[in-house]
Amino acid sequence: MTADRRAAAPHRAAVGREDVPVIVRQTQDAGPAEVARDAEERLVVAGVEVARYVVRPDLDPRHGPRPHLHPVRTRAGTPVTDASPADHVWHLGASLAVQDVDGANLWGGRTYVRDLGYTWRDDHGVIAHTGWRARAADRLEHDLDWRDRDGRTLLREHRTVTAAPAGEDAWWLDLSATLSSATGADVHLGSPATNGRPGGAGYGGFFWRAAATGEPRVHTADAVGEEAVNGSAAPWLALLGTGPGGGAYTLVFTGLGPGDRWFVRTTVYPGVCVAYAFDRPAVVAAGRPRRNRHRVLVADGHLDPADVPARLVPVGGA
């Protein structure tokens, strides 16, 4: 997509530190009964609801409508995701989202344009649920279309989300996604960084907006702090935070694929992303699906860094 494509000039209202367009509700391609039935699912571990999966969010198109997990909670009930925060209203719990998919913004918010910076543009698409394959208390499996602003499907996705216990104080969230080109050609994935933004802003992929009071701590096996871990390719990354109400929690992220990097923010806002195009564009090649598997250990309390590797070994070795 060229830089001069249909630049939008929507009326905007100030929200936090960002300007966002006034909300215009989006209609997805399903009847009222189907929308009501598919609007939200729940994931349960050992009889406790640990997450809700919002399948058909009713959002302004410029906020990046997409299925997302929110709220996600620890087994003790501490919330560990945030959605539609004032600073970035298009941050939606835990989700897959990419700002540049063959020129379509499937992240939400302003688009980073080389030599112009962040600009409101009429380029927002949608990631839409198209059908269920399985629905159970601990497993959700469905198909999705990644569409541009004109409704053209760029990617087709098969996604599975599961929840499983990980000891008495934790559980595993597992999200597997297979992305396939729907255009008959290679589909390119980009980020603000690949479009010219400096400062390690290579976000886009599996993104988790955390809920935290105060600044969380973040570390890998050999690095500590936002500056040290942002852009790294460590096998795992831990974020230690305090949720609303004072509950301590630890999130341990795994699942970098070839070429992926960690995008991490703790100072401006708390967020972790498995970035697909951190410093160079990625490609979903025609006829060659991209397979991703993202696993997050959601634990009560602040785990000692020395204890994290042992916690990453699943019971039974599976």
Image (tube, grey):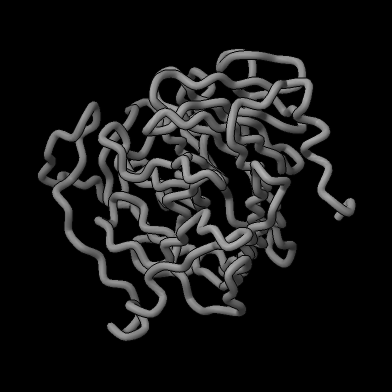
Q: Is residue 100 visible?
A: no
Residue drawn where x is 40% and y is 49% of the image: 105
Taking the image as shown, residue 8 lies to the left or right of residue 104, namely left
Residue drawn where x is 43% and y is 52% of the image: 70
Taking the image as shown, residue 305 lies to the left or right of residue 185, namely right
- Residue 112 placement (x, y as % from top left): 38, 34
- Residue 238 placement (x, y as % from top left): 64, 28
Number of on-image labels: 0
Q: Is residue 97 above or below residue 19?
A: below
- Is residue 237 or residue 242 the one in the foreground? 242
Q: Is residue 211 visible?
A: yes
- Residue 89, image quadrant: top left
- Is residue 12 or residue 265 the one in the foreground? 265
- Residue 290 placement (x, y as % from top left): 70, 56
Q: Is residue 181 above or below residue 241?
A: below
Q: Is residue 224 above or below residue 289?
A: above
- Residue 225 placement (x, y as % from top left): 59, 14
Taking the image as shown, residue 146 lies to the left or right of residue 292, namely left
Residue drawn where x is 62% and y is 66% of the image: 138
Residue drawn where x is 66% and y is 37% of the image: 253
Q: Which part of the image, by quadrant, shows the C terminus?
A: bottom right
In the picture as drawn, the residue positioned furthest to the right comes out as 317
- Residue 289, image quadrant: bottom right
- Is residue 63 or residue 46 the one in the foreground? 46
- Residue 254, image quadrant: top right
